Image (cartoon, grey):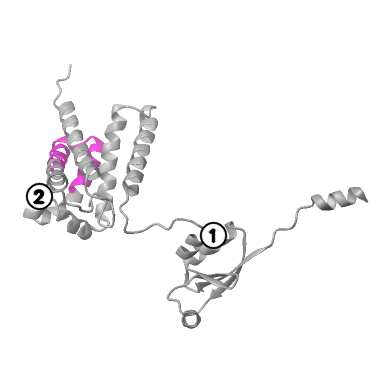
């Protein structure tokens, strides 16, 4: 009897089951992604989810009117409405990113990826991840990707670019031409062809850009968003854009020195 009593005392008490009610939009032509994210978040926090689908526009409107909410999904825990996906993150103590806060994450991701691409190309071609050619590819790949981001919405980029670029302010079409010129120079530098075209293009746009950024940020002390990664970023204008332009200048000068270096 004593052994049985000891076993019973040591047996852990069963944990109470945590439950949550989730109302989310699941229509024939659309499933709300925030509803899926809310369901996943609840399940990873150990909740058994009573997953209730709103399958028609009438059901969604009726639910919003009944609970006085503007959006779905909506989560309820212990009969208390927690709210949407962002509210649920806050409930669990998870930080909710502010879309208006300045961030260098897009730039860090971009340069990390182009560096990885350059090293991968170096390994594939020369068997090494660290070489002068890898450094050249890193700059050229970065130019191509930066141009790609600008080309996603040229008009938005041009609008931001006109805030500070000295040549674009005098000749507006230059703001539209710039991403095409940057992309062309980058592609030619990757290929190692037409140096007579890629070098002056990179040197020209890089020099004008560097002077423009330096004047706007470090002389006039203006607080502007950087157009370097396209028109939708919250990257502040400053050393990132200046670095982009200095990279182009350095690449153009380096390739010029190689092109005109006397061969033995």
Residue 226 image label: none
Q: Nearer the viewer, residue 5 or 174?
A: 5
Task: Say which residue label 1 marks.
Answer: 41
In the shown orientation, is residue 6 left or right of residue 101? Answer: right
**What x and y, as percent, mark residue 130?**
35, 28
Q: Which residues are magenta?
A: 181-206
**What x and y, as percent, mark residue 213?**
16, 46
Residue 203 to residue 38: above or below: above
Toward the right, the furthest residue is 1
Q: Nearer the viewer, residue 240 or 259?
A: 240
**What x and y, as percent, mark residue 62?**
49, 83
**Residue at image location 24% in from the left, 53% down from the top:** 150
Q: Residues within 10 Å of mark 1 (few under 14, many from 20)?
A: some
**Residue at image location 18% in from the left, 57% down from the top:** 158
Task: Say which residue label 2 marks.
Answer: 166
Q: Nearer the viewer, residue 91 or 264?
A: 91
Q: Quadrant of the C terminus?
A: top left
In the shown orientation, is residue 146 left or right of residue 6? Answer: left
Of helix, strand and loop, which mostly describes the magenta segment?
helix
**Residue at image location 46% in from the left, 79% down from the top:** 68
Q: In the rendered structure, which disc, 2 or 1, sits on the residue that comes first in sequence?
A: 1
In the shown orientation, is residue 211 left or right of residue 29? Answer: left
Q: Quadrant of residue 207?
A: top left
Toward the left, the furthest residue is 170
Q: Which SS class for mark 1? A: helix
In the shown orientation, is residue 201 left or right of residue 141? Answer: left
């Amino acid at each position: 009897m004593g052994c049985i009593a000891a076993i019973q005392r040591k047996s852990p008490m069963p944990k109470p089951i945590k439950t949550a009610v989730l109302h989310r939009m699941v229509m024939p032509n659309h499933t709300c992604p925030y509803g899926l994210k809310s369901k996943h978040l609840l399940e990873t926090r150990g909740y058994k989810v009573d997953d209730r689908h709103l399958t028609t526009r009438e059901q969604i409107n009726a639910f919003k009117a009944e609970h006085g909410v503007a959006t779905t999904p909506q989560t309820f825990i212990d009969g208390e409405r927690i709210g949407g996906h962002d509210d649920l993150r806050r409930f669990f103590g998870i930080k909710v990113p502010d879309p208006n806060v300045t961030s260098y994450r897009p730039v860090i991701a971009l340069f990390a990826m182009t560096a990885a691409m350059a090293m991968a190309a170096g390994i594939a071609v020369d068997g090494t991840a660290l070489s002068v050619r890898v450094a050249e590819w890193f700059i050229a790949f970065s130019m191509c990707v930066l141009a790609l981001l600008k080309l996603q919405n040229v008009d938005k980029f041009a609008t931001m670019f006109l805030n500070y670029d000295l040549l674009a302010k005098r000749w507006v079409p230059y703001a539209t031409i710039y991403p095409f010129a940057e992309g062309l120079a980058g592609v030619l530098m990757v290929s190692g062809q037409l140096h007579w075209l890629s070098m002056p293009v990179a040197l020209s746009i890089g020099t004008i850009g560097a002077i423009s950024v330096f004047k706007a940020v470090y002389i006039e002390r203006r607080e502007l968003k950087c157009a370097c990664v396209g028109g939708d970023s919250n990257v502040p204008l400053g050393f990132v854009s200046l670095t982009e332009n200095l990279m182009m200048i350095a690449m153009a000068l380096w390739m010029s020195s190689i092109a005109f270096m006397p061969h033995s």
